[in-house]
Amino acid sequence: MKLKLKITNFLQYILLIVVAIIMIFPILWIASSSLKSLIDISAYPPQLIPKEIHFENYVEAFSRGDIFVYLKNTLILIIGCTTGTLISSSIVAYPLARMNFAGKKIMFGLILATMMVPATATIIPQYIMFSKFRWLNSFLPIIVPAFFAFPYNVFLFRQFYRTIPISIDEAALIDGCNRWDIFIKMIVPLSRPTFITIGVLSSVFWWNELFIPLIYIDSDRLKPLTVGALTTFKNLFIQRWDLQMAMCVVMVLPPMILYLFTQKYLAEGIKTTGMKG
Amino acid sequence: MEHEGLLTKKNKRNVRENITAYAFLSPWIIGFILFSGVPIIASFVLSLTKWDLISAPRFIGLGNFIAMFSAGSDFWNVLKVTLIFTVFSIIATLTWSFFLAMLLNFKLKGIGIFRFFFFVPAVMPSIALAFAFQLLYNKEIGVINYILYLFGINNGPNWLMDNHLVIPSIIFVCLYTYTTGQMMLIFDASLKEVPKELYEACSIDGASYFQKFYYVTLSYISPVILFNLVIATINAFNGSFSIIYPLTFGGPGDASRVISLAIYDSGFKTFRMGYASALATVAFIMVVAIALLQFKLSDKFVYYEN
C-alpha cells in the first residue's frame, strides 16, 4: 500500500515536471536565443544552451531600436490607466456591494453585460468619436476611458467589498457619517490588498496590450513597446531573430518579476472572479 | 399623523440613498453611454453607410450586408475561419486549463512551484509569445520540426504557412495565453472547494474513479465550467487579435483571418468604415448569440447548490 502510494507520487511528479517544461519552454527558448548569434540561432540541430554567450545582442537591441522611447510610453500608459481605473472602479463598485437602491439589479446586470462586448465591436465608432475630439495619435483615447471605470475591475472591487462586514457601514451611518466618508475612511483602507491586486492586474494588462494602442497611435514617438516591437528588427527581407529575442526578454521579464513578487495578490484576484454571488 | 411623518422621513432617506448610489455610479454610467452604448448604436447606423472618413458618409441601406453576404464575398471565408477558430480554441483552452488545474490538485509537496510555472506564460505579452512561436514553428530552424525529426518524421511542415495547419498551430499557442492561465486558477480554486464527504460517500457506494469524476467533480463545479466557457468565448473574439495579428497577420492568404482582423483591415487599412461597422455588427450578434446559447444550455447541465 505504502509502496503503491510512493509510485503514484513519483508518476505524478514526472507528469507535473513534463507539463511544467512544456509551459515554460517558449520563455526558455526566448532567453536562450537572445544570447545566441544569428548564425547559432539558425544552426541545426537547435541548441537550448548557447554555444557562446552573446550579451552584445542586448546592447545592440537597445542602441539600434527605439526601445527606450517605447518603454517610456508603455510606462505612461500603465500609470495613467491604472490610476484611472483604481479611482473610478473603486468608487463605482461601492453602492453595488454595500447599498440598496432602486435599479441595482439592472445596473449590475448592465455592467456584467458590457464585460462581454468585444472591443472590436465598438472600436470603429470610438475611433471616429476620438478623431472628432482631435485625440488621435495621443494617449488620451487610451487613458481617459480608464477614468470612467472598467466593468471587469468594478466587478472585482464589488466581489471584495462584499467580504467586509456590512455592520461597519450601518454603525457609521447611525453615528452620522455619510456614504462618501464611509467609503474614503473605512472601505478604502480596508481594501488595500484589493487595490494592490487590481493595480497589478491592470499594470500587466497594459504592459501587454496591443490592439487599442495599435488603433490610436501612429507616430513612432508615442508607440508603446508592444506596438513598436511589431516592426522592430524585422522587414520583408530579414528577421533579426537575435535582436528580436533580446527585445522579447525585455518584454517578458518585468511582468514575470512582478508576478513573482505579487503571486498571492494576483492569484487571489483572478480566483475572486470565479466566486459565486 | 405621527405614522405618516415617519413614512415621509423614511421615504426622504430612501430618495437620498438612491441619489447617493447613482452619484457613486456616475463615472461608469457616463463611461457606459460614451464608450459602449453610443458606439454600439452608432455601429449599427454606420453599417448602413459608405464612408472613407474623408468625404461625407453616404447612406446605402443594407448595401454593406448585401455585399458581405453575396456569393463571391470574402466574408464567407472570414465567417468560416472565425467559427472554426472560436469553437476549437474554446474547447482546447478550456480542456487544457482544466487539465492543468487537475494536476495542481495532486496532494504533493511543492505544488506551489508548479502553479507558478503553469501560470507564468500567462503574464507575458502575446506579441513576445507570437515571436517565440514564429521561431519554434520555423520550418528549417524551429525546435518543433527538430522534435518531429527525432521521432523519425523528416521534412516537418511549415506550420504557420500551411493553409490547413495554421489554425491548429494558433490554437496551440492559445494554450499559453492569459485567458488559459486565468481559467486554470479559477478551476484550481473551485476544485479545492468540492466537499471531501461527497467523494467518501461515493467510495462507500463503490463508485469507480471515472464515476466519481463525472458525478461529483464535474457536476459540483459545473457553474464554474459555465463561467469559464463564457470567459473563453469572449476571449476567442477579443483576445484573438493580439495573438493572430503578430503571429500570421491573418495569413497565409486569408487562412487565419478571423473577424477581428477583418474589422481591423477594413476599418484601419482600407478605411471602409461602413463595411467595417457591418462586420462589427455581425461580430456583436455572434457573441450575443453564443452567450445566450450557453446560458440556455446551462439550464440543462449546470447544477446550483441552492
Image (spheres, rainbow, N blue to C red):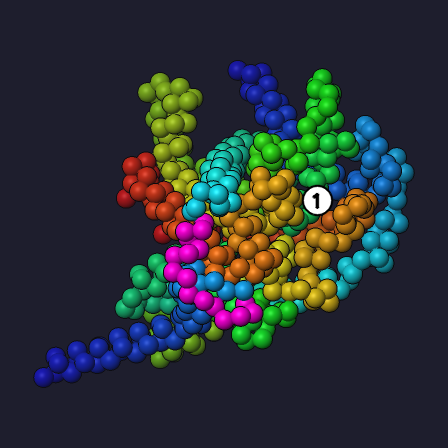
Question: Going by the image, does B281 lie left or right of A133?
Answer: left
- Residue A78 in view of the camera: yes
Left or right of B102 on screen, residue A240: right
Residue at 41% across, 53% down = B65
Is residue B61 part of the magenta span, yes or no?
yes
Q: Quadrant of residue A15?
A: top right
Judge left or right: residue B118 versus residue A102: right
Q: Secondary structure under badge 1?
A: helix
User: Camera-side residue: B262 or B227?
Assistant: B262
A61 drawn magenta: no
Observer-nearest of B276 and B149: B276
Whole-percent x, y for residue B269 in the image: 60, 57
Query: In which quadrant will I find the C terminus of chain B?
Result: top left
Q: Amino acid at mark 1?
A: Phe
> Split into 4 quadrants, where in the image is the N terminus of chain B?
bottom left
Residue at 65%, 44% in the rendered image: B247
What is the residue that sits farthest to the left in this orientation?
Answer: B1
Residue B179: x percent and y percent?
53, 45
Q: Is residue A61 above or below residue B87?
A: below
Query: Residue shown at 56%/50% (left/top)?
Result: B261
Which stretch is magenta?
B53-68
Residue A94 placement (x, y as % from top left): 41, 67
Residue sitting at x 60%, y 70%: A136
